[in-house]
Each structure stands twice: as C-alpha cells, then as structure tokens.
Image (cartoon, rainbow, N blue to C red):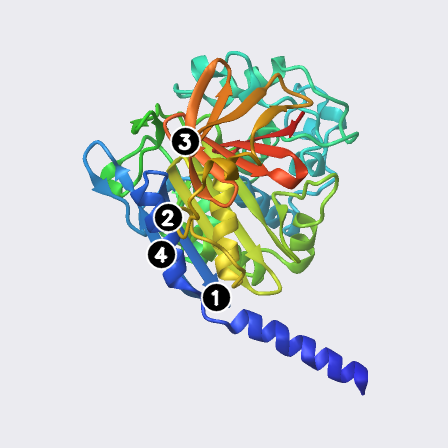
C-alpha cells in the first residue's frame, strides 16, 4: 500500500509539473531583452502533447531591407538535416531495402575503407571518414555548386581519421554519403525523397531542400555581429551538403517533425530506439541533451551564422525548436533560459534586477586566469567600480549582465565567473573556453 501511495504521489507530481501553464510572459521578456540589446535574432516554437504553446520571432529576416522576421520565417537548419536523413534511412531499413550491416562498398566501393564501413557506422559517426568540411580547401569551393561526382572526388582523397568502428567522431561525410544512398535506392533526388517520405506525410509546408536565399519566400539571410553592427554572411551553396545540412525549415515545422517521429508516424518504435541509443555519445541521427534530471533527444545545426536546435523531452511530451540567423548571446545560454522557463525553474532574465557592484565587490574576480589546453591568458583587474579584462594584448571594460556574468558586446565575448571555484568561462557564440585562476 505504501508503494502504491508513493507511486501515485510521484505520478501526480510529474503530471502537475507537466500541466503547469507555460510562462509565456517570461519567454517574451527573455527574447525581447535579447532583441532590444542586439544580442540575438531568430524564432522559437514550443509544443506540449502535440499542441502549440508558444511561438516567437525577433530581429530581421533581411536586415538590409528592414524585413522583420515572423514565426513563419524560414531558416537554414544545418546539421538538423541529419535527423531527417536518418529517419529516411530507417524507413528504407523497415522496407527491407537496406540494412544496418550493409557495406558502403556496395554503393561506393572506391571511398576509403568502404569494404569495412557499414550503414550503422555512417549513422553513428563511427566510419572514420574525414569530414569534407574540414578539407583545407573547403573555403575556396563552399560557395560554388558541386555535383555528386565532384563531392565524391573530394571524399576519395581525404585520409581516414581512424579505422571503422573503433571510435566515434563527428563527420559530415557520413550523412552526405547516406543521402546519396537514399537517392540511389529511391531513384529520385534527395529533395523529392524528403518530400515523399517526410514533409507530405506530416504536413511540413515550410521544410524543403534549400537553394539560394529568396527573401520573397520568407527565407532569411544570416548575419554576424561585430563592433556594434550586424553584417550579412556569404552563403554556402547547398548542393554541397545534401542530407548532411541542406534543409530549410521553421521552428514550427521542426517541432511537428520531431513530434511525428515520437508518435510513430514516420518510423516504428524499434527504429526510434536505434536512433536514440547512444554509443560513445553518438546516436543514429540524434544526440541526448540533459537538463537537470530530464533528458531530451534531438540535434543541433550550424551553417554560416544560422544556428538551429530541436529537442524532444519524451516523458513530458514537450518539443521545442529554436532557429537563429544572427546570434551574439551564447546559444547554450539561450537554450538553458528557455528550458528553465519551460520547467518553471528559477531564472533571472539577463540585465534585470542587477545589484550595483562597488570596487570591493569586484575583488572576488581579479587575478590571472589560464587554460590547461589553450594558449589563453586573461588578466582581470578593476578601475574603481568597473571590471577590466586584458587578453591577447587588448584591455577593455565589461558590462554586468547577471550574477557573476559580464560581457564585452563589441568583441562578442561573455565572461562567467565562479569565484569560489576560481574558474572563468569565456563564451563566444558556441565556443566555450575554461580557465582557472592562478
């Protein structure tokens, strides 16, 4: 009876946590603050139990022409495309047209180690194939259309990083080859396979294989912030990436996609279990993302200055997707803020309720900080009530944005201190550097 009562109480607690209304006002406050401070542009969608709970867009789709973003604005989603590709591979497996043990040599025998690489290795990044985006010449051809033959020629000349199956390392080459294999089996372009296998089935009207950005189609350009202004970034030709990173979508569509995946509308439960089973931290088109005692599954993406993230929390049946075409405030901090608000955890909106810092308050941060694995030295001092940071020959004041958190907006640097641990995190969009006070 005690066990039954405890179980019932636990169920009621979980149900109560899930059923608490989403704090949309606080989400608005977060994104309005970031937009007003020129720290982020983009769009967010959140759904619970298959019902849309929140949509928000800030910033511009086309800054040069002052075209504001809206919740239907379409973004390049980069490697989130890999989730779509993995789903199509598992559809082919369920149709008995492919298997996880099939060798790459059956399709592309002249790729290095093809006779030892399986479909499974490609899906969970255990092939050892070097990523074509790490090719030393990549920047010279990334903006020009590339045929399959040209891309395969590039892949053939890349030396493998390790023997197939011995470890895991992220490589775009894996999913480029998987998308070519889908085309071979389906006898149609990846764009058409995507349409027939996923978008038409799930009503994703804003998801497709991308091309040159077309503002008239509500597609967005991407921008990088530097010294007070956003600058448009040169486009990558999407013929290069195919199923590794060429999809355009919206947060609303990404939420619908991952919900359909977990509702069994695209693949069976056994296939989904394969996708979310981790080996050396890699699933098959998915990664786990922890938030306190909860685990979500999904994928991140980056191409140019587009960043995308899609998450699904199976226990809570909560889906969220965030796409941005211009980011200065660290993306991980934005996602953490979204999740803390969604799960009703304490969270302070940046720049709000700040306690004025006096000279004595700054003493807890001062000193020299170094990195164990990078040639980074940061000296932290003060000028009366201003914190001063010197690194790489530059000295500058930083602005407080939260507890133990400061930024230098012009340079795009964010500094998060943990005085009691004598540590400093330097954040630059997706890059995080860990330093220790000497």
Sooner in the amino-acid sequence: mark 1 or mark 2: 2
Label 1 vs label 3: CA separation?
30 Å
Question: Measured from the top left, where is residue 17 in percent x and y?
Answer: 56, 70
Q: Quadrant of residue 211?
A: top left
Sooner in the amino-acid sequence: mark 2 or mark 4: 4
Please state which of the two labelled residues, at mark 1 or mark 2, is closer to the viewer: 2
Q: Quadrant of residue 82?
A: top right
Question: Measured from the top left, where is residue 235 in percent x and y?
Answer: 36, 26
Q: Which residue is tagged 1?
A: 50
Sooner in the amino-acid sequence: mark 1 or mark 4: 4
How packed is label 1: few (under 14 Cα within 10 Å), some, or many (20 or more)? some
Please state which of the two labelled residues, at mark 3 or mark 4, is closer to the viewer: 4
The image shows residue 362, relative to residue 295, as above or below, that is above
Q: Residue furthest left?
A: 65
**Residue 43 - label:** 2
- Which residue is at the front of the view, 397 or 101? 397
Sooner in the amino-acid sequence: mark 3 or mark 4: 4
How packed is label 3: few (under 14 Cα within 10 Å), some, or many (20 or more)? many
Q: Which residue is tagged 4?
A: 28
Q: Is residue 32 visible from the viewing direction of this image?
A: yes
Please state which of the two labelled residues, at mark 2 or mark 4, is closer to the viewer: 4
Label 1 vs label 4: CA separation?
21 Å
Sooner in the amino-acid sequence: mark 3 or mark 2: 2
Q: Which residue is tagged 3?
A: 305
Q: Secondary structure at mark 2?
A: strand
Task: Please report contact status of discs 1 and 3: CB closer than 8 Å, yes or no.
Answer: no
- Side (left or right) of 246 relative to 270: left
């Amino acid at each position: 009876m005690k066990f039954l009562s405890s179980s019932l109480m636990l169920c009621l607690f979980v149900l109560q946590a899930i059923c608490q209304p989403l704090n949309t006002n606080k989400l608005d406050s977060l994104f309005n603050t970031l937009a007003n401070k020129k720290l982020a542009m983009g769009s967010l969608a959140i759904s619970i139990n298959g019902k849309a709970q929140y949509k928000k867009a800030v910033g511009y789709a086309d800054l040069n022409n002052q075209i504001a973003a809206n919740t239907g604005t379409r973004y390049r989603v980069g490697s989130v495309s890999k989730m779509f590709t993995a789903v199509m591979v598992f559809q082919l497996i369920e149709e008995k047209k492919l298997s996880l043990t099939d060798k790459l040599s059956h399709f592309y025998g002249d790729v290095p180690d093809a006779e030892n690489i399986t479909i499974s290795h490609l899906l969970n990044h255990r092939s050892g194939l070097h990523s074509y985006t790490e090719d030393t010449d990549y920047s010279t051809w990334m903006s020009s259309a590339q045929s399959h033959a040209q891309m395969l020629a590039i892949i053939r000349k890349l030396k493998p990083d390790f023997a197939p199956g011995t470890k895991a390392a992220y490589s775009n080459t894996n999913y480029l080859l998987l998308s070519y294999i889908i085309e071979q089996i389906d006898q149609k372009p990846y764009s058409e396979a995507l349409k027939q296998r996923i978008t038409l089935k799930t009503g994703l009207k804003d998801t497709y294989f991308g091309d040159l950005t077309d503002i008239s189609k509500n597609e967005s350009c991407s921008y990088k912030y530097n010294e007070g202004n956003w600058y448009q970034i040169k486009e990558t030709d999407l013929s290069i990436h195919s199923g590794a990173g060429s999809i355009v979508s919206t947060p609303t569509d990404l939420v619908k996609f991952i919900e359909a995946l977990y509702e069994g509308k695209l693949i069976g439960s056994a296939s989904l279990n394969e996708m979310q089973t981790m080996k050396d931290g890699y699933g098959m088109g998915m990664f786990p993302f922890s938030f306190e005692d909860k685990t979500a599954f999904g994928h991140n993406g980056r191409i140019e200055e587009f960043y995308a993230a899609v998450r699904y929390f199976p226990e809570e049946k909560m889906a969220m997707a965030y796409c941005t075409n211009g980011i200065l405030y660290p993306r991980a901090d934005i996602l953490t803020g979204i999740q803390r608000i969604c799960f009703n955890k304490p969270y302070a909106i940046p720049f709000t309720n700040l306690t004025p810092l006096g000279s004595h308050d700054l003493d807890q941060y001062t000193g020299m900080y170094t990195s164990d694995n990078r040639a980074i030295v940061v000296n932290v001092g003060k000028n009366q009530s201003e914190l001063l940071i010197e690194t790489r020959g530059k000295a500058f004041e930083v602005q407080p944005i939260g507890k133990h958190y400061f930024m230098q907006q012009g340079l795009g640097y964010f500094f998060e201190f943990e005085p009691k641990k004598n540590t400093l995190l330097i954040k630059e969009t997706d890059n995080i550097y860990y330093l220790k006070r000497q």
